[in-house]
Image (cartoon, rainbow, N blue to C red):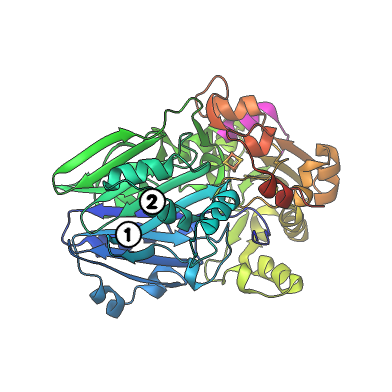
C-alpha cells in the first residue's frame, strides 16, 4: 500500500563515511545539513570493523542523536539517513538505515529514491520464502543480495542491483566495506568526497562543506563503488543509455549551496528567475519570493527586471511540521502560522510573487490571499517550474494525478482559482536554458511532460492515477 500523499515534499537524504575515527559525529553533521530532505525519521549505523551497531528514531536529527545516543556509536565508518516517508509509509520499522544480521555477517542499507518494480519483486521473494520486516521498498535489496548465490559481496550487490527498476541511491555497509550505488539513470544526486584519508558520500555537496570534506566527483549512473581499507574500486553494474537527473532537485529540493553535476543550485534558480523576467515581463513595484526555496529565483527575476526585491513574505521557522496536525482546518491554520506577509513592504504595491511550483493550488491561493489582505493592490504569480501535470514515481511526493491542479486545468483556470492577477510558468526551454542546457537530454522531466525514463509498472500506475 503506497502512502497517502498530501503535496510536494522533499525526499530522503543519505550520508556515509569510511575510515575516520569520528565517523558517527561526521555523519550527524552531514545528516543535519540534509535535514531539509526528510524530517520524519533518522538513523546512523556504525562499523568498528567487527560489528555493525545502529541508533534510529522518528524525529529530527538533533532530537534522535542525543549525547547519550552518540556514545553508542563508536566506529570508524558509518552510514546515515534522513527520511521523508514515501513507498511503505512511516513508522519506526521503516526508519533507515535498515540493519540485517545473518551468519554471513551484517548488512546496513540506506536508500534515497523509489523503486517502481517493488511489488513484483516482493511477490517473487515472498514466494521463495522471504519474510519482510518493513513495508519499505529499500529492504528488497537485502533479500535479493542474500538470495543471489554469489559468495563475493560485490557480485551479490551487482546482481541484486541489476534487478531493481526506478530511482535509487544506495549506501550498503558491511563490517568491512561500504558500497555506494546509483541507478542506471542517475535520477537522484549522489556525490563522493574526501576528508584526509577518509571517503565521504552524500546526497548533496552541502554536507561536504559542513564536515570540511573536499568534493571529488558525482557518482555515475549505474556505478557501484566499493570502499574498504584498501581503497576505492569503481565498477559499472549497468550501462546507462538515458541519464536522467531529476530537474526538481534544482528547482526545489536541494539546498542552494549544493552543486549537482557541477551546477550550483542557487545559480540555477537565479537563472530561472532571470529567464522568467524575459518570458513574463510585468509592470510592478516589488518582487518577493516564497521562502525559502523561491528566494534565489525571485532575486534573479528582480535583477533582470530592474524591480526591487523585497522581503514581502516571512517564514516563521519555529512552527511544527504540518503533517503532525490532524485535520484540514488545523493544516490551514498551520500555513498562516508558517508564513506572514510584510504589510510595510506590500501595502499599496503591485507585487510579483515568485514561487517554485504549484502542486494542488491550495498553498498558492493562501499566499495570494495573505498578500492581498496585507494591502497588495495586485499579485502577479510567476512560477520557476513548468506546470506539474503528472505524478512522480521516483520518490518525490508530488500527489496523485487527480490532486495535481495542472493535470486538467489551463493556466488561466489555475490563475482564477488561486486569485492572482496574472500567472506565468517558466517554459521547459527556459528551465533547461537556466541549467545551461539546449535540450532535455540527461534530465528527467516526467512530472512536467510525462516522459519517464523507466518503465512504470501497473500496480504503481494504478495508485498514482486513482480517481
Ligand atoms: S518525475 Fe519530476 S520529480 Fe520525479 S524524478 Fe522526474 S523530474 Fe524529478
Given residues 273 and 259, the one toward you in this image is 259
Q: Give the range drawn in magenta.
A: 272-284
- Residue appearing at x 23%, y 45% in the figure: 227
Circles 2 and 1: CB distance less than 8 Å? yes
Q: How crowded is mark 2: few (under 14 residues within 10 Å), some or many (20 or more)?
A: some
Which quadrant of the structure image shows residue 354?
Answer: top right
Q: Residue 107 carries which label?
A: 1
Q: Going from the N terminus, do you reach mark 2 or mark 1 first?
A: 1
Relative placement, left or right, of 105 versus 369 is left
- Expressed as whole percent of the image width and height from the top left, the position of residue 332 reads 73, 68
Residue 195 in sight in this render: yes
State which image quarter holds ligand 1: top right
For the residue pair 453 and 429, the one nearer the viewer reads as: 453
Q: Which residue is drawn at 37% across and 54% down?
A: 146
The span from disc 2 to disc 1 (Cα, nearest Å) is 10 Å
User: Left or right of 130: which side holds 360?
Assistant: right
Q: Nearer the viewer, mark 2 or mark 1?
A: 2
Residue 229 magenta-highlighted: no
Q: In the image, residue 67 lies at what x, y percent?
A: 28, 77
Query: Label 2 belongs to which residue?
Result: 145
Amino acid at each position: 500500500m503506497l502512502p497517502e500523499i498530501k503535496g510536494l515534499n522533499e525526499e530522503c537524504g543519505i550520508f556515509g563515511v569510511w575510515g575516520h575515527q569520528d565517523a558517527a559525529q561526521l555523519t550527524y553533521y552531514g545528516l543535519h545539513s540534509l535535514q531539509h530532505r526528510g524530517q520524519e525519521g533518522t538513523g546512523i549505523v556504525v562499523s568498528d570493523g567487527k560489528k555493525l551497531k545502529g541508533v534510529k528514531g522518528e524525529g529530527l536529527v538533533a532530537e534522535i542523536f542525543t549525547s547519550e545516543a552518540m556514545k553508542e556509536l563508536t566506529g570508524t565508518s558509518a552510514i546515515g539517513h534522513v527520511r521523508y516517508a514515501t513507498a511503505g509509509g512511516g513508522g519506526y520499522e521503516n526508519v533507515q538505515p535498515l540493519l540485517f544480521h545473518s551468519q554471513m555477517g551484517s548488512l546496513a542499507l540506506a536508500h534515497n529514491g523509489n523503486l517502481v518494480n517493488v511489488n513484483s519483486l516482493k511477490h517473487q521473494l515472498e514466494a521463495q520464502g522471504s519474510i519482510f520486516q518493513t513495508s519499505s521498498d529499500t529492504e528488497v535489496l537485502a533479500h535479493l543480495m542474500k538470495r543471489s548465490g554469489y559468495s563475493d559481496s560485490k557480485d551479490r550487490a551487482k546482481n541484486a542491483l541489476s534487478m531493481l527498476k526506478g530511482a535509487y541511491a544506495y549506501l550498503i555497509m558491511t563490517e568491512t566495506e561500504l558500497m555506494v550505488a546509483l541507478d542506471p539513470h542517475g535520477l537522484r544526486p549522489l556525490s563522493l568526497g574526501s576528508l584526509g584519508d577518509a571517503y565521504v558520500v552524500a546526497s548533496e555537496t552541502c554536507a561536504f562543506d559542513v564536515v570540511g570534506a573536499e568534493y571529488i566527483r558525482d557518482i555515475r549512473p549505474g556505478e557501484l563503488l566499493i570502499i574498504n581499507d584498501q581503497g576505492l574500486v569503481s565498477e559499472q553494474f549497468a550501462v546507462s543509455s538515458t541519464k536522467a537527473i531529476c530537474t526538481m532537485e534544482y528547482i526545489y529540493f536541494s539546498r542552494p549551496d549544493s552543486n549537482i553535476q557541477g551546477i550550483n543550485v542557487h545559480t540555477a534558480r537565479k537563472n530561472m528567475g532571470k529567464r522568467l523576467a524575459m518570458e513574463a515581463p510585468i509592470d510592478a513595484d516589488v518582487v518577493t519570493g516564497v521562502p525559502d526555496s523561491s528566494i534565489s529565483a525571485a532575486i534573479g527575476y528582480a535583477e533582470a527586471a530592474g524591480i526591487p526585491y523585497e522581503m514581502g513574505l516571512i517564514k516563521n521557522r519555529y512552527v511544527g511540521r504540518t503533517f503532525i496536525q490532524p485535520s484540514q482546518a488545523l493544516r490551514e491554520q498551520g500555513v498562516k502560522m508558517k508564513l506572514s506577509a510584510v504589510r510595510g513592504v506590500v501595502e499599496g504595491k503591485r507585487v510579483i510573487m515568485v514561487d517554485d511550483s504549484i502542486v494542488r493550488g491550495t498553498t498558492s491561493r493562501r499566499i495570494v490571499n495573505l498578500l492581498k489582505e496585507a494591502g497588495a493592490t495586485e499579485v502577479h504569480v510567476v512560477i520557476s517550474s513548468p506546470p506539474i501535470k503528472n505524478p512522480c514515481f521516483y520518490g518525490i511526493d508530488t500527489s496523485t494525478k487527480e490532486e495535481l491542479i495542472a493535470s486538467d486545468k489551463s493556466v488561466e483556470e489555475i490563475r482564477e482559482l488561486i486569485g492572482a492577477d496574472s500567472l506565468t510558468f517558466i517554459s521547459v526551454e527556459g528551465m533547461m536554458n537556466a541549467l545551461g542546457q539546449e535540450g532535455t537530454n540527461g534530465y528527467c522531466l516526467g512530472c512536467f511532460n510525462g516522459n519517464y525514463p523507466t518503465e512504470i509498472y501497473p500496480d504503481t500506475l494504478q495508485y498514482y492515477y486513482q480517481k
